[in-house]
Image (tube, helix red, strand yellow):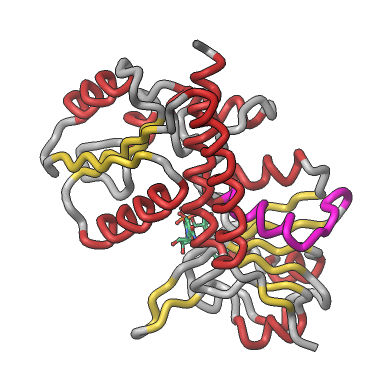
Amino acid sequence: MSAQLLDGKILAKNLKEDLCTEIVGLKSKTGKAPVVVNIMIGDDHAACAYAKSQQKVAEYIGIDYRLNILGKDITEDNLSKHIKELNSNPKINGIMVHKPVPKQINHQTVSNRIDMVKDLEGVNVGNVGKMLLGQTNIIPCTPAAVMEHIKSTKIDLRGKEVVVVGHSEIVGKPLSLLLLQEMATVTVCHVATSEAGKLVDHIARADVLIVAVGKAGLIKGDWIKQGAVVIDVGINQVGSKIVGDVEFDVAKKKAAFITPVPGGVGPVTVVMLMKNAIEAFKCQLKDG
Ligand code: NAD
């Protein structure tokens, strides 16, 4: 038996169509569409390429996406001033600070300067708190993309054993909260789980396994429970190839569903950013 592929490009396309419809409705009601600003510091080649792909998706959906490229020597104070100006500009609905940022900038500190209702990536400390309480629709994009993939399998998470490998602030931790909201039994593993020699045991129990580590082939295919859903968030360059954290060829023989890398979580993540833009826009309409 071979797993059903969770094709991120197809899922992203369907989600994009839903967002297009929503934008058409919002435009006819308000005469406006969301305007978002991505602040990029320096012109890192990979970051620029990623921003271009965001712009393409935004334009397709009907969102006005602006890229503000600032000098790589900008201070945290000056960046905060720039964010303050964008916060007070009523024409701007969403703001993000593109990663990576140079050494003199703390990404969390500057993200906390973004007005909570304009926090495109849901990383402002206030939105993280709201997410814990289930009180916001602005959700960090990669965890949101993982949840969309799981939703597409039609599996009910209630009472399921879900194992998340990786406990970063941008993926593992927020994802564990979203899974808890769906009443899954969540285990979060990390580097110390591996050090303690317990990773294999946890993975063997997982009805749903989500891996976000950044180590090619860390998860061996034969560790996976028969019939599991496997979502691989990892992105690793191996020679000229991009691969995930899961040993795909073996894992696909045991899993019921599996995401490919590339083409799994990545394409959906970009669409989730645009979903947040729409949520921010709607929230600001409500606030008048
Ligand atoms: P991170 O470096 O912030 O965190 C890595 C996590 O892996 C930590 O929790 C760490 O404890 C854990 N870890 C490290 N070694 C381990 C081991 N041997 N066993 C078990 N756990 C181990 O990483 P991140 O920013 O969360 O990113 C993780 C991966 O996901 C990267 O490959 C990144 O490129 C990818 N990523 C993809 C998307 C996407 O949209 N597809 C978005 C964000 C990150």
> Is 67 situated above or below 192?
above
> Is 14 situated above or below 41?
below
> Which of the 4 quarters of the picture holds residue 7?
bottom right
At a point 65% along the width and 30% down the height, the residue shown is 132
The residue nearer to you, when weighing 171 against 156, is 156
> Is 41 situated above or below 6?
above
Question: In the rendered image, which quarter contains the N terminus?
Answer: bottom right
What residue span does the magenta drawing correspond to?
143-159
Percent across and percent down for residue 182 are 79, 43
The residue nearer to you, when weighing 131 against 8, is 8
At a point 52% along the width and 30% down the height, the residue shown is 28
The answer to if 155 sits in the magenta stretch is: yes
Percent across and percent down for residue 229 are 75, 67
Figure disc tally = 0
The answer to if 173 sits in the magenta stretch is: no
Left or right: where 120 falls relative to 8: left
Is residue 192 visible to us here?
no
Percent across and percent down for residue 280 are 50, 28
Q: Looking at this view, name the residue that lies furthest to the top.
A: 288
At a point 66% along the width and 53% down the height, the residue shown is 148
Is residue 108 visible to us here?
yes
Left or right: where 154 falls relative to 112: right
